[in-house]
């Protein structure tokens, strides 16, 4: 009930007013039955913009940190995300991927729409990164189509670290559903899962026009963070050396 209150009364109209999104290919999203909507992930706003324009309810797998904040504020945020159709998934530990797959298959078993970001995290620089194979596992096990979706302009509207979005044109573009029924029963074959995932990412790239990076975003982020920390340490040592008098 609260999902539709957010969508049509509280949040949806505000998002449409601020972002004024142009919607393309909405008829590619099935009107009934289970399906996966797989999109690029450029902004925190993506979680809410796509549901605001879809005619059907969609459930996203969201990181558990959104649901575990301390105090009253944390409980309110958790309640908000649940009401907005988000399911918490713990992304730490070796079983994180299996937990996400279980939750996703549960949504699809109810003939609902499942939203997923195959990159696994937000792009920190606007490029499209290598997809994780969980989306392929769910598509093959559930036997459902995958609708590629491109969010265009949300990175500029709300870059990483920005709380209040900027006014910037946004396009939400849906592509034709991808049918992977030819791979039925092969969801345990690593080569098949990688091929399916790459096909999904290629469809997203074709819709978004993003530069593609054949590496996981989380790995690139960690490397860049580590490099920044090393550079900061070198700068700090140089400053201490300059302040230390000779002899």
Image (cartoon, rainbow, N blue to C red):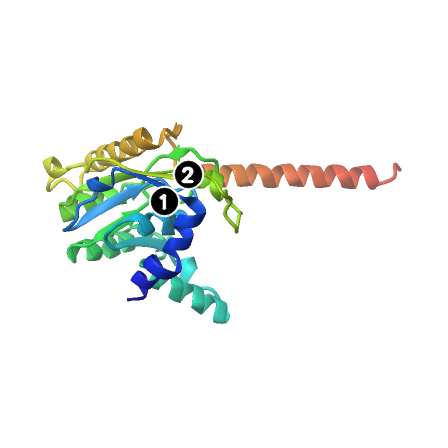
Q: Are circles 1 and 2 on residues that touch, CB within 8 Å?
A: yes
Image coords of residue 5 (percent x, y): 33, 63
Write down the residue under mark 1. 120
Circle 1 packing at 10 Å, graded few (<14), some (14-19), many (20+), is many
Residue at x-position 31% and y-position 48%: 53
SS assignment at label 1: loop
Residue at x-position 35% and y-position 35%: 130
Q: How many marks?
A: 2
Q: In the rendered image, is residue 95 in sight?
A: no
Residue 47 falls left or right of residue 247: left
Q: Reading the chain from its start, which is encountered first: label 1 or label 2?
A: 1
- Nearer the observer, 240 or 66: 66
Image coords of residue 60 (percent x, y): 31, 53
Q: Is residue 183 above or below residue 100?
A: above
Circle 2 packing at 10 Å, graded few (<14), some (14-19), many (20+), is many
Cα–Cα span, label 1 and label 2 = 8 Å
Q: Quadrant of residue 13?
A: bottom left
Name the mark on residue 41: none
Image coords of residue 191 (percent x, y): 21, 33
Q: Give the quarter of the figure containing the N terminus.
A: bottom left
Q: Is residue 46 above or below residue 109?
A: above
Residue 239 falls left or right of residue 228: right
Residue at x-position 29% and y-position 30%: 202
Q: Give the quarter of the figure containing the C terminus.
A: top right
Name the mark on residue 217: 2
Name, please, the residue furthest toward the bottom: 72
Residue at x-position 36% and y-position 61%: 9
């Amino acid at each position: 009930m609260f999902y539709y209150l957010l969508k049509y009364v509280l949040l949806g109209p505000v998002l449409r007013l601020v972002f004024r999104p142009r919607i393309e290919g909405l008829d590619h999203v099935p009107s009934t039955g289970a399906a996966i909507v797989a999109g690029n992930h450029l902004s925190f706003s993506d979680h809410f913009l796509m549901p605001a324009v879809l005619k059907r309810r969609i459930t996203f797998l969201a990181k558990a940190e959104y649901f575990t904040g301390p105090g009253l504020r944390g409980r309110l945020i958790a309640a908000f995300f649940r009401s907005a159709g988000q399911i918490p998934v713990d992304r730490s530990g070796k079983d994180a991927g299996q937990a996400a797959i279980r939750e996703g298959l549960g949504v699809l078993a109810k003939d609902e729409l499942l939203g997923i970001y195959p990159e696994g995290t937000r792009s920190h620089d606007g490029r499209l990164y290598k997809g994780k194979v969980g989306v392929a596992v769910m598509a093959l096990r559930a036997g459902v189509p995958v609708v590629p979706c491109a969010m265009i302009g949300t990175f500029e509207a709300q870059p990483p670290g920005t709380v209040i979005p900027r006014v910037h044109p946004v396009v939400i573009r849906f592509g034709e559903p991808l049918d992977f029924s030819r791979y039925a029963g092969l969801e345990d074959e690593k080569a098949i899962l990688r091929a399916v995932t790459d096909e999904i990412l290629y469809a997203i790239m074709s819709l978004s026009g993003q530069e593609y990076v054949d590496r996981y975003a989380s790995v690139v982020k960690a490397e860049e963070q580590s490099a920044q920390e090393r550079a900061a340490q070198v700068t700090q040592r140089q400053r201490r050396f300059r302040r230390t008098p000779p002899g």
